Image: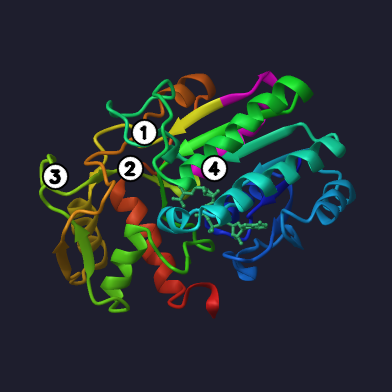
């Protein structure tokens, strides 16, 4: 298939591109490099530098490359920033998303895989979170992802646009060539590894008095390759109808202390920590269930092991001490 990957110069998008190319698909990366990196555009992919809001350029890219499907990864995705600047999130995650959908309809492209987020659930009662859990986002990031999902439902009904929406928490890990290089970095695994290299003085632990076995928050981490495979499997299943899947480690999840201890083991380095107060709006446990995608699509994560995940991120960081900046 000829696939357009929006946000393909970003962290997860680069790995999705790598996996698509490996499977023999043709890929056009569409990215404005606002957060991504030119060097993250995988060799073998075509690259269009542009903003999703630029309807003319988007129409041209879809037409010129005879695109058959879109994997939509481009978004603004910082929870804290979304609370301070909801306008940016409605603009980038909803309004430009609608530009993409209109361009797809104009080009008769009717297949879309959307990287949503498990933040659409807010603070659910039951863990692990199933797709049937009520959606109740607690920040504009989750809210705008959910708004786009709602648009997809109606575009399917009215125009036959088939979509798969994938809701997950924390992508983690790396491949040999594609890794995580965000500015600012807000994800605990790269932050912890930066502390291992001395780039960061310490890791801040936000609260150790939660009702969890070691008192720190429990979260869900999925290897970025497993995520990419899920996007590709969801794409292959689109002709059978639209769907929503959670992606998660499904089991007990991993505590913040467990992540840091595993990183100490993997790196063999000291990682200083500081216990600070809880952050507002941080639930004790957030873990998603992958039961539905496993039973419907046969998705099976290959790297669902914290040590493997951290080891792959560490290797990438050692090969790219300055990220993609080199
Ligand atoms: N990283 C995670 O743990 C995680 C978890 C759940 C969901 N997601 C979702 O997965 C997707 C990818 O996440 P990521 O961590 O790879 O993010 P990222 O910031 O590394 O990648 C996003 C890419 O989109 C590009 N982009 C943003 N707005 C654009 C626009 N208007 N036009 C063109 N390009 C634009 C950026 O330049 C960047 O390269 C996002 O949609 C995010 O919400 C990520």
Q: Which residue bears the numbered disc 4?
A: 144
- Which numbered marker is on residue 210? 3
Q: Ligand 1 near label 4 (Cβ, under 8 Å)?
A: no
Of tags 1 and 3, the one toward the viewer is 3
For the question of whether residue 88 can be seen, the reply is yes
In the image, residue 76 lies in the stretch drawn in magenta: no
Q: Residue at x 36, y 65 (%)?
A: 314
> Separation of disc 2 and disc 1 at Cα?
7 Å
Q: Which residue bears the numbered disc 2?
A: 220
Of tags 4 and 2, the one toward the viewer is 4
Is residue 194 positioned above or below 165 on the image?
A: below
**Would you say the magenta stretch is mainly helix, strand or loop?**
helix
Q: Which residue bears the numbered disc 1?
A: 288
Magenta residues span 226-243
Point out the tag, 2 or 3, that comes first from the N-terminus.
Answer: 3
Q: Ligand 1 near label 3 (Cβ, under 8 Å)?
A: no
Q: Quadrant of residue 272?
A: bottom left
> Separation of disc 1 and disc 3 at Cα?
19 Å
Point out the tag, 4 or 3, that comes first from the N-terminus.
Answer: 4
In the image, residue 240 lies in the stretch drawn in magenta: yes
Say whether residue 139 is left or right of residue 202. right
Q: Residue at x 69, y 49 (%)?
A: 96
The answer to whether the residue labelled 2 contacts the one labelled 1, judged by CB atoms less than 8 Å apart, is yes
């Amino acid at each position: 298939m000829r696939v357009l990957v929006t946000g393909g110069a970003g962290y997860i998008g680069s790995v999705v591109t790598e996996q698509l190319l490996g499977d023999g698909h043709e890929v056009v990366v569409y990215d404005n490099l606002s957060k991504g990196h030119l060097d993250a555009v995988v060799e073998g992919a075509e690259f269009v530098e542009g903003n999703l809001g630029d309807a003319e350029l988007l129409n041209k890219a879809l037409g010129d490359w005879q695109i058959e499907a879109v994997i939509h990864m481009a978004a603004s995705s910082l929870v804290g920033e979304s609370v301070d600047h909801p306008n940016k999130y409605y603009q980038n995650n909803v309004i430009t998303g609608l530009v993409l959908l209109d361009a797809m309809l104009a080009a008769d492209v009717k297949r879309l895989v959307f990287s949503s987020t498990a933040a659409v659930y807010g603070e659910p009662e039951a863990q692990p979170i199933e797709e049937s859990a009520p959606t109740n986002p607690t920040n504009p990031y989750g809210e705008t992802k959910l708004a786009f999902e709602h648009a997809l439902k109606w575009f399917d009904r009215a125009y036959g646009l088939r979509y798969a929406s994938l809701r997950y928490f924390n992508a983690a890990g790396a491949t040999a060539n594609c890794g995580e290089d965000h500015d600012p970095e807000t994800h605990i695994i790269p932050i912890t590894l930066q502390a291992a290299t001395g780039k960061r003085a310490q890791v801040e632990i936000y609260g150790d008095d939660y009702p969890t076995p070691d008192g720190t928050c429990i979260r869900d981490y999925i290897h970025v390759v497993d995520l990419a495979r899920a996007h590709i499997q969801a794409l292959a299943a689109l002709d059978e109808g639209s769907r929503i899947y959670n992606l998660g480690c499904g089991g007990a999840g991993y505590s913040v202390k467990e992540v840091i201890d595993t990183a100490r083991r993997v790196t063999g380095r000291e990682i200083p920590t500081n216990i600070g107060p809880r952050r507002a709006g941080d639930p004790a446990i957030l873990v998603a269930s992958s039961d539905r995608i496993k039973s419907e699509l046969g998705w099976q994560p290959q790297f669902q092991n914290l040590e493997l995940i951290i080891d792959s991120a560490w290797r990438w960081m050692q090969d790219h001490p300055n990220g993609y900046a080199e």
